[in-house]
Amino acid sequence: MSLWATLTIVSFGALMVFAILASIFVARLVRRPTLPLSEDVGGVAEVLRKLRKREPMTDEEVTLARQAVTDRGSFLALCIPLTIFSIGCFYVFGSLEHLHGLRPSERTFLGVIPMFTSTNLGIRMLKSAGLKRRLPKLAAQRVEE
């Protein structure tokens, strides 16, 4: 078995694992009761913007910000961009295996596009998760009680 075949099989295995974990995360999100502010279009983005700029927020906004920051920082949430990245790897490695050493074309590297986009998504999720330090301390105690 060639290197590309091995990498294709490994990326397919990673794809399956990450897709299952991502679907578990999405199923948990669907079952969770929603906050009224999260139903508004752009509600979460507005709350995170306020958190980023350290503007005053209501208790409801703090609760939504805490929920969004916690969700985006969990490993299961990061499985979504990891799934997309694995799809790109599977496509590139599978194409290279299919060529059996022949010169690859531009089409072979179309899988790099989802790899770049998933990297961008993962970085943005981690940046949002980093806002956890900016959440008000008093609100953290109120939410936990």
Image (cartoon, grey):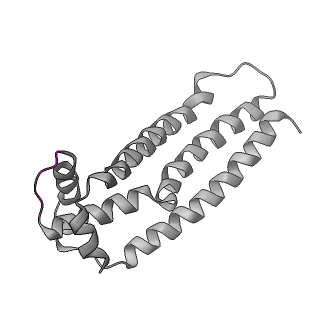
Dominant SS in magenta: loop
The quadrant in which the N terminus is found is top right
Measuring 46% from the left and 60% from the top, which residue is drawn there? 74
Residue 98 occupies quadrant: top right
Of residues 35 and 12, the one drawn nearer to the viewer in this rendering: 35
Number of numbered discs on residues: 0
Quarter of the rendering containing residue 32: bottom left
Please state if 66 lies on the left or on the right of 13 as rendered: left
Image coordinates for residue 84, horizontal then vertical, percent: 53, 47
- Quadrant location, the C terminus: bottom left
Q: Residue furthest right?
A: 1
Which region is colored magenta?
53-57
Q: Is residue 108 visible?
A: yes
The image shows residue 58 at horizontal and vertical percentages of: 11, 66
From this viewpoint, which residue is outermost toward the top? 103
Answer with left or right where residue 85 lies relative to residue 10. Answer: left
The residue sitting at 25% across, 62% down in the picture is 137
State the residue in front, 103 or 145.
145
From the viewer's perspective, tell me whether residue 9 is left or right of residue 128: right
Instruction: Name the image quarter holding residue 122.
Output: top left
Confirm whether residue 63 shows in the render. Answer: no
Give percent across and percent down for residue 75: 52, 58
Q: Is residue 51 magenta?
A: no
